[in-house]
Amino acid sequence: MPTLTDFIKFLTERSHTLRMLGQNKPKTVNTKQILQKKKKEERFVLASTVATTRKQMSQVILSTAQVFVQDSNGNLVTCRALLDPGSQFNLITADLVQRLKLQQIKRNTIISGVDKQQLQRFWEQETLSEGRFYTEEEKRYEKQFLETTTRDVDGRFIVRLPVRPGIILGESRSQAQRRFEQLERRLVKQPQIKQAYCEFMREYEELHHMTLVEDLESLKSKESYFIPHQAVVRPDSVTTKLRVVFDASAKTTFGTSLNDKLMPGPNLQKDLLHITLRFRVHEYVVTADIKKMFRQILIHQKDRVLQLIFWREDARKPLRVYQLNTVTYGTASAPYHAIRCLKELATIYRKKYPAAARILEEDMYTDDISTGARTIQELVQICQQLEAILLKGQFCLHKWRFNNPDVLQQFSKQQRMDKFYTLNKEEPLKTLGILWDSAQDQLQYQVKISKDQATTKREVLSRMSQIFDPLGLVGPVLIKGKLFMQKLWSEALDWDQPLSQEHIIAWDSYYSSLSQFNDFRVPRNVNPQNIKDRLIIFGFSDASEKAYGACIYVVSTDNQGNIHSYLLCSKSRVAPLKTLTLPRLELKAALLLSKLYNIVKIAFKDKIEQVRLWSDSTIVLG
C-alpha cells in the first residue's frame, strides 16, 4: 500500500506534468553553466534546473518559493522567498544576511510598504508549517547552552548571552538617555500610564530583576549597551495592563545593536496548529501560563553589562543606571533561552514527572500551556506534575482555567481564592490566539468592525489580517476576502492608492457582514466521551476556477454508541491569476489535503484508527 509520502510525490509529479503540457516548448537552462559563464558577476543562483518560456507570467498573490542562495563562500543556503510583484524594492532579512555572510553598507532609504506584522500574520495563516534543519550558527548556540548554562542553589537557570564575536557595539548611552528623556515628557502628560509604568519598574527592582549600578567608571573599560524602553498598553490583559518593553534593536554609533550581536538561536517553538488540534480532542482540558517566564531565568553576571537602562521615577532626581539581571523581553535570544530551559527541565525530570515532561515538550506555546486528559483524575495528576516540575526551575504557573469546575476543587483553598491563580471569568478569554469560553467549552470569534472606511489596499489587508483563524473554521467566508484582495493585486494598485467607488462598495458590503462572526460558536471538544480514544479521519478536497481547498472531519463513537462528526480543520487557497485547468486545480486541492492530513497525523500520533481521503476528480483518482 502506498505511503503518504508516495501520494504527495505522485500528486506533485502529476501536477508538474499537466503544467508542462499547457506551456509552450520551454528552454532549459542549467545553473552550473550559468555559474561557469558568469562566475564573477552572479552572486545569487538557483540550485536547480530552471525551465523558462517566452510566455509572460501573470502575477500570483503573495506566492513563495523555497530557493537555494549562494553565500559568500560559495555554499548553498536554503531560504524562503516571498514573491511580491507589486514591490519596487528587493528586501532581505537580517538573519539571512548573517547566514550568507554578506558585507553590509549603511544607507538611508525611504520605503513605503505594507506593515510587516500585518503581512506576516496574514501570510502565516496561509502557510502550512515545514520542517527545517539547524544552521551552523544555531548548532554553535546549542553547544554553548549545554556547556555554559548553570543553576543556582534554588534550581534557577543562569545563562550566558550568545554573542557573535564579529559584531562590535558602538556608543549607545547618548541615544538611550535621549529616548528616556522623551519618555519622561510623554509620561508627564499621561499620569495614569506613568503610575502604572512606575509600579512596573518598582516591582522589577523589588524582585531583584534589575539592580542599581554603583560603579559607573567600571563600564568604561567594558563593551556595554544601554537599552531604551517604552510602554505597551494591553487593555485586554487579565493581569498586566501595561508592560515595559525593551528595544534591544536600537542602533549604536557603529550602526549595530545588541540584537545584531546576539545569536537568536534555533526556533524551538512547537507548531501552533499542532497544539490547537490536540486541544480539541481532550475530554477535560486546562490552560495556564508561566508567570513572568523570561524573568525567572538569570543572565550571567559577566553579561549584564550588555543590559543597562536609565530609570528614575522623579525627573527632579538624578538619572540612574540599572542593569537587568534576567532574560529580557525584546532581546533576540530571549525566546530560545526560555523554551530551551523548559526543555532542559523536561529532560532532567522525565522519569519522575513523565506526563509533565511530555506537555512541556509538546503542548506549550511560548509561556502558555494548553493540554488535557480523558478523566478528571488524569488531569489533576497532570496539573500536580506540571507545578512540581516547573518549580524545580523556579517557574510558577497561574491563570488556570478548566472546562470542568470539579478540577478546581483539587486545589487548595488559598489557591482558589487568588484571583490570578485561577480564572473563573464567565466571558471567553484567548487561548492559543483563539477565544475559548471555558464555561460552555466553546470556541468563538470576535471581530471589531471599524467605523473608518477602508479606502486603500493597505487598509483592506489590515482589516483582513485581524481575523485569526488557524483552524480554518470560517474559511468559506474568509476566502471571499482573499479573492477581493487578489483582485486588487491584479489591478497593480499601489498600497496607498485610493480604491475605486465600485471596490469600496464591494468591500464595505463584505466587511460589514463579518460582524456575524461574533455570534458563531463551535464546540471545542470534537471527541466527546470516546470509549476507545481513537479517531476516524475523513478528508475532502475540491476546486473551482476561483479557489480550491481541503477539510478534515473527525468521527468518533461515545460510550452510549452514538456517532459524532465534527469539522476539525480546513485550508483554502485562491486560484492563481494565471489560468489553470480545473483538473490541475483539483490536483492542487488533493495535494493540499494530503499536507493538511500530514499535520493532523503528526498532532494526533497513535490516536488515528482509520483514514479516508476523498476527491471527486477522476484525474486525481486515476
Image (spheres, rainbow, N blue to C red):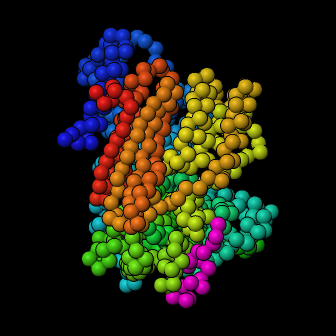
Q: How many marks overall?
A: 0
Residue appearing at x 48%, y 28% in the figure: 544
Say if residue 34 shows up in the picture: no
| Pick the front one: 93 or 577 | 577
Image quarter of the C terminus: top left
Residue extending furthest bottom? 413
Residue appearing at x 56%, y 53% in the figure: 250
Q: Which of the 4 image quarters holds residue 521?
A: bottom right
| Pick the front one: 277 or 366 | 277
Say if residue 549 shows up in the picture: yes
Q: Say above or below: 276 vs 599.
A: below
Taking the magenta stretch, the answer to whether it contains residue 51 is no
Residue extending furthest left? 1
Q: Say above or below: 272 vs 450.
A: below
Segment colored magenta: 412-427
Q: Say above or below: 310 vs 19.
A: below
Residue 398 rendering spot, x and y as whole percentages: 52, 76
Q: Is residue 467 left or right of residue 270?
A: right
